[in-house]
Amino acid sequence: LASRLQNVFGKLKGKGKVSEDDVNEAMREVRLALLEADVNFKVVKEFIAKVKEQAVGQEVLKSFTPGMVVIDIVNKELTNLMGGTQSKLAKSNRPPTVIMMVGLQGAGKTTTTGKLAKLLQKQNHKPLLVAGDIYRPAAIKQLQVLGEQIKAPVFTMGDKTSPVEIARSGLQHAKDNGNDYVIIDTAGRLHIDENLMDELKQIREVVKPDEVLLVVDAMTGQDAVNVAESFHSQMELTGVVLTKLDGDTRGGAALSVKAVTGCSIKFAAMGEKIDALEPFHPDRMASRILGMGDVLTLIEKAQAGIDQEKALEMQRKMRTAEFTFDDFLDQMEQVKKLGPLDQLLDMLPGMGKMKGMDNLKVDDKQLGHIEAIIKSMTKDEKVKPEIINASRRKRIANGSGTSIQEVNKLIKQFEEMRKMMKQFSGMMGPKGPKGGMK
Ligand code: GDP
Ligand code: MG
């Protein structure tokens, strides 16, 4: 979904205002991309209508293209689609807070029970895990192993007692032992059936949970949404946990669950490891789906910090490869106004991966050196770095009171930046080359 959408936005060109044609064309592609990602049909339709309504006629900030403006709107709407803000776990006024995990077999209930306990422990809570799945072979053992791993108590009564009785006793055990959270793992079936629902309803009657969390496998896409709908109609869920997001490349379930069921996604699991569970943040998920960093924040920062005219001029230079060391220095100073380069790269679409690249790391201290080095260059050298040979490097290092290594590093940095900017201008600039980004 990410690369597909980026292509769409790369193509959005024009000036001043976002025209209706711009938007229509982009939205046709977005619509296809969403459907391909297995997002519910009705959800897609409503989504497109909302984005269109907002996008047409939007003023485009000088240094951004219509593409970026539309990305921003799409990003915001995707966030809204998934519930807007983060939905927190309920907390009982009279502890323990009781959480009941439900879902189909293999969705990740037991694993998530362990992960959630670990998350709660990190917040200094004392969760008790209750082994309520007596049907699946080794389900109890599985929970015990998880409990040992995180040093959380696990309440079991073997597989001969009814799950309802286990849940009731487990709750009592928590009260007696000062556990402020009880997480009840339950059995799943391959398909939703009446026996399963009856048992779950009975457990619910007995323990009166503060949360009934449905665990669904994100990789099953639309099926996950259907499962959520059926469970919700029978169990009145309080939230959804999406698992296996690490293997979900399409994002269809994440995008549809809330819109279809009205039920918020509270947690996201992205791996088999015990700490691979996070509170679900709709805004971060939207960015992830778009394959970009926090564009919104970047735009806000840019509006506040960057000199618009200068930025525009810079873009022109980057595109035409007129970009010189003087511009580089200018750029560095602009970037400094915005904050650490590392963070900035995170916020740029597709740039997150650049972060690890040593050659692009610049801190404020280094900036002083960079300035000195560039000031020691001749006019020609600043414009044509390729003429800076070994003896020139030595002279520059001496002149700036730095080392040849530092000079080498800067030149390399400059060249990489020039390359990167050329690619990036494909998205930023109105006349840049098409889709430089992956
Ligand atoms: P249950 O039947 O609902 O209790 O499901 P389990 O908790 O036993 O999980 C089923 C399988 O899915 C196990 O092999 C887990 O390791 C795996 N699993 C659970 N959550 C995740 C996840 O977020 N990512 C990945 N890759 N695997 C997961
Ligand atoms: Mg299980």
Image (cartoon, grey):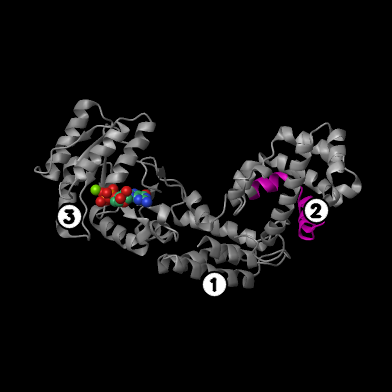
Q: Earlier in the sequence, mark 2 or mark 3?
A: 3
Residue at 20%, 50% in the rendered image: 187
Mark closer to the observer (2, 1): 2
Q: Main secondary structure of the magenta part?
A: helix
Whether label 3 lies within 8 Å of ligand 1 gets the answer no
Spatial CA distance of label 1 from label 3 is 42 Å
Circle nearer the N terminus (1, 3) = 1
Query: Which region of the structure is painted magenta?
Result: 299-322
In this view of the protein, which residue sits in the foreground, 343 or 41? Answer: 343
Disc 2/disc 3 C-alpha distance (Å): 66 Å
Q: Which residue bears the numbered disc 2?
A: 323
In the picture, measured across the screen, residue 212 lies left or right of residue 431, that is left
Q: Where residue 283 appears, x then y in whole percent? A: 50, 50
Q: Is residue 421 left or right of residue 377?
A: left
Query: Which residue bears the numbered disc 3?
Result: 196
The one nearer the camera, 359 or 313, is 359
Residue type of the residue flagged with mark 1? Arg
Label 3 sits on what residue type? Answer: Leu
